[in-house]
Image (cartoon, helix red, strand yellow):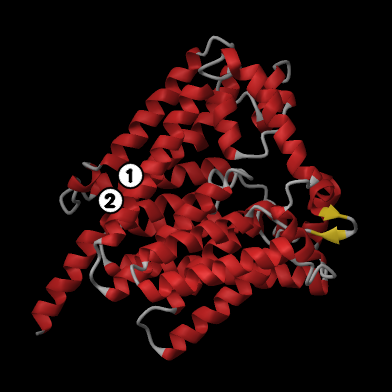
Amino acid sequence: MSARSVLFFLLIFSFITKVITRQLGLDLPIEPIILALPVLGFIMAIMRSADQDWDDLKSDLFYILIAWLIFCILEVFNPEGASIDGWLREIVPVAIFPLLVVTLSFLALRTVKDLNIFLVIVISLSCLAALYGIKQVRFGLSRGDQLFLDSGGAVTHVLWGKLRVFSFYSEAAQFGASQAHIGLMALILAFGPFGKKLKLSLFIAAGLMFYGMLISGTRGAFFALVVGAFVAILLSKKFKVLIVGGVIAIAFICFLKFTYIGNGNYNIYRFRSALNPNDPSLNVRFNSQKILRDYMSDKPFGGGLGVIGFNGMKYNPTKFLSTVQPDSYWVKIWAMTGIAGITLWLGMMMYILGKCCGIVWRIEDESLRVKAIAITSGIAGILFCSYGNEVINMVPSSVVIYMSWVLIYKIPKLEQEIKDNKLLTA
């Protein structure tokens, strides 16, 4: 077994965790397994150290995540006195897991073939998720799905008698955002310099996933779609694409904002409500953020890791922040780490996104360029979508994004590989 095979198994496993637990009824310790896999891959890399190129770890991306981990470790001394158990549970997905996946990706992903395998896996599994979501709507729920709803999931997944489709994901929000993310990637790839059969397959895959996005009832997916498309249009560097794409994007937003066409369809109506400033759900979030802003005014380092959200309710039930629903990963980071932490985290995210855009901007090979644009637009979409939901911190989106960062960072080497192969075959 190699570090590369472990990494791709982790990617596949991140998509099918709920198939194992919900559909198959197997009570496996999913979180420890997901954490153990990159550790196992790292051990495999060490065992093959003679063949391993460690120089790739000398990257600003690696050092940025080290700095974030150190900051999160120091949060254990937060004067607000949050539970150590909550801190331990929260630091894993927030800081340790991203560093592990990025480290393993730097060591394992080396070739254009690895990039192509990554794209095939995420698009194929996302299409399967869309098909299973359609099955939930058209043919009904499985026993495992129904048990999920009966165990409390119906509160957020059955609204006005309509099912918010969650497929084989943890929840509808994660499903919808992931469908928008990967669907946009497939659509961008469909315009690349590929064969007609592949283009047609990618267009069908994109349409399938956009439908999956709609039936999820996830309004936050709108931002993954629009922001990602905007980044893709800019990175195209083609004036015609910039104008046509901009007009289409504006027309799409105006269609949702200023018309009532399609409101008879509940999924379109709910998606459209993402642009309604008077939406009750949106106002509840704004009110929660106002309460947090007042409470956090004298807490520059927040309330501590694990003080809000699920871990807050479980490990810090006596803390005020545990009573507030963050409804946003940005807000969650802010509540846990204060203005200092959210400034650092957002600065990191924007730097990484900017660096990725700069790398893509300089790519010359057309095939590699369209793949890089697709991946980078997905990174941007999920980052901004995470303002509305905790998407970037949940599998499979988290694994896809962390691997995406590394793939873009490695693009210059991959382009050199293509150039070298062309010289050899000339």
- Residue of label 1: 103
Which image quarter: residue 6? bottom left
Residue 25 visible from this viewpoint: no
The kind of residue tagged 1 is Thr
For the point 24% across and 43% down, the residue is 57
169 lies above or below 321: below
Farthest-out residue, right: 161
- 422 sits to left or right of 197: left
Q: Nearer the viewer, residue 341 or 255?
A: 255
**Label 1, label 2: how many angstroms apart (C-alpha)?**
6 Å
191 lies above or below 258: below
Question: In which quadrant will I find the N terminus?
Answer: bottom left
Element at badge 1? Answer: helix
Element at badge 2? Answer: helix
Estimate the x, y position of residue 330 in percent, counting from the top left.
Answer: 56, 37
For the point 45% across and 71% down, the residue is 243
For the point 54% across and 54% down, the residue is 396
Whether tag 1 and tag 2 are in contact, CB under 8 A, the answer is yes
